[in-house]
Image: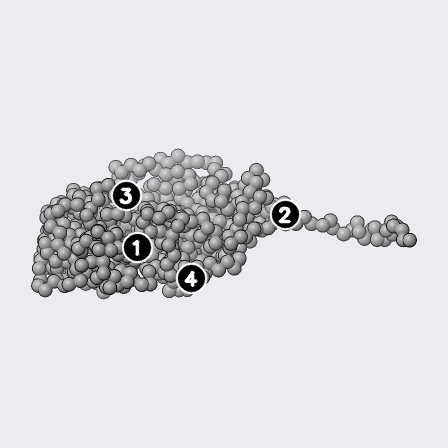
Amino acid sequence: MSSLRPPSPLVAALAAALPATAPAQTTHLIEEGQAQVVAAFADSTEWIRHHLWVETEFDTDGDGRPDRLHVDVTRPAQTETEGLRVPVIYETSPYYSGVSGLDFDHFWDLSQEVGGEPTPRDPFPPTIAHIADQPIISGSHIGTWVPRGFAVVHSQSPGTGQSDGCPTMGGANESLAPKAVVDWLNGRARGFTTPDGAEEVTAEWATGKVGMTGTSFNGTLPLAAATTGVEGLEAIVPIAPNTSYYHYYRSNGLVRSPGGYPGEDIDVLFDFVLSGDPEDRDYCIANARGELEAELDRVSGDYSDFWAARDYLNHIDGVRAATLMAHGFNDWNVMPEHSYRITEALKERGVPVQIYYHQDGHGGPPPLAMMNRWFTRYLLGVENGVEDDPRAWIVRAGDERDDPTPYPDYPHPDAEEIVLHPSAPGNAVGALSLHAAESAVVETLVDDHSLPGADLAALETSRHRLLYATPPLERDLHISGVPRVRIRVAADATAANLTVWLVALPWTPEPDHIGENVITKGWADPRNAGDPRIGTPRTGSPLAPGEFVEFEFALQPDDQVIPAGARIGLMILSSDQNFTVHPTPGTELSVELSGTWLTLPVVGGAAALSGASR
């Protein structure tokens, strides 16, 4: 019979020299292609929080040293206790330390002739209270992503909060700033414990894979960072991003306000966010705002090198980050063309892209499951098949935002362009049909900015607009894509606003949802007619009073099902009370109907339209 014997002294010594068995490392939990909450990551009392300043490659506040950005970090405890390395969800913003109040007295005065000199603006006083100590910049995304095993990082844009520099409203530093943070997370840029000290902070806890997201200005900056091509920025989810400051503040050569903010312009936005160190504000006002004031041009509304530098489509070749874009078709602040123009360009370049559109207004992220699949695929490297998912997800009117309808792409691949022609009398409600006018009928309207477009659309007759409508639809009609208007117009002045609304009639005074009355809109300056780049920002020349010009321009992208019983109406007016400048009423516009038509993208094409309209 054998007996148990103690190990020899040699065996005991060898055993003692061996390391203890390492505890199992906490890992991500993936189900159905999505990162799940892990109990060990979810204990917020154990999360590690710290802040630092990341050194950039620019100096915009003129102090002779590279600007530093204020950054905060929230990460799972296991990045410290277990040496776990995690990917990062990152949001950056100029809003984290407060903004000026919306005092419209400091906006531009809309009382201005088209092409005339504007009344000088009284700038906002630089009175945003400076927050000197703000170790926790924001709580956004932390509760969603840290429990799933991601770190969450925030940073303040240049010239805001505790970040050095100056706001430039789309200048190069606003692209290079988030690039510097991504570089720091990858060990290529330096971080410091203080804004001006030498003690460095590193990010050994980061895998180097970064996903950015945010809404509005915060959604603009992920795209701005992506245009730099920075290595490590693997995915972005821009929500209602401003992708071109020209398209935000101008439209086809016309000075146009963003919806809800009449008289706002790029210099107003500067004043709205200037929350940085008070000692730097005078320098920023003289230099950064000084450039904006000198270059914005509210006389012509034409494109320029200044605007081109702030148009991210011009820098799109740098983008390699997989892009999940989100926008509302009824966003009249940052309009849906901003997302559309970028996603179309990324598709052409083979960058992974998906589109989520809903029927509401400004903001609105994709469903969490959609974002989760995106970040799980591109930050965690899980082959969840997201690249094979439908390319477009459209929330239909009346559906919940987390229940989008999948499309193979947007615009819907079955959409075909159908040309509809107006016929008199447009001061009442003329016809809009597949049949072109046989003779050169000319109809007129008289500009009056005091009349809201909604009122004009609801009137049975008006000399201040032209309105043409289809017969009532006998069945639902699905439109998907970018409507375009071709127009032959003359004015009795050298310049005039031109506005087009596509509406659903009869006009409902109290609609059930935001898109029930207005299908889409567009604005243009007739002075730019004849330019071969029609539909893009361009330079124009004064009109010859009474002389007709022809041009074509796009309305805002849309996707909706127009219900049976409604009429699709094309409304032409001059000034748009809430969007354009307000010239002296009385300018007369003449529209020749034989040279005017609407191109409408209809799913099912002419057969669908013929079947829906008799």
Looking at the rendered image, the quarter that the C terminus falls into is bottom left
Depth order, front residue of 351/543 = 351
The local secondary structure at tag 2 comes to loop
Of badges 4 and 1, nearer the viewer stands: 1
Q: Is residue 524 above or below residue 439?
A: above
- The three-letter code of the residue at mark 3 reads Asp
- The three-letter code of the residue at mark 4 reads Val
- The three-letter code of the residue at mark 1 reads Asp
- The three-letter code of the residue at mark 2 reads Glu
Q: Is residue 568 left or right of residue 170?
A: left
| Residue 40 location, quadrant | top right
Determine the residue positioned at 34% across, 37% down: 100
Q: Is residue 394 above or below residue 198?
A: below
Q: CA distance from mark 3 to mark 2?
A: 54 Å
Residue 351: mark? 4
The local secondary structure at tag 4 comes to loop
Determine the residue positioned at 24% across, 41% down: 510
Which of the two labelled residues, at mark 3 and mark 2, occupies the earlier sequence position? 2
Determine the residue positioned at 72% across, 50% down: 21
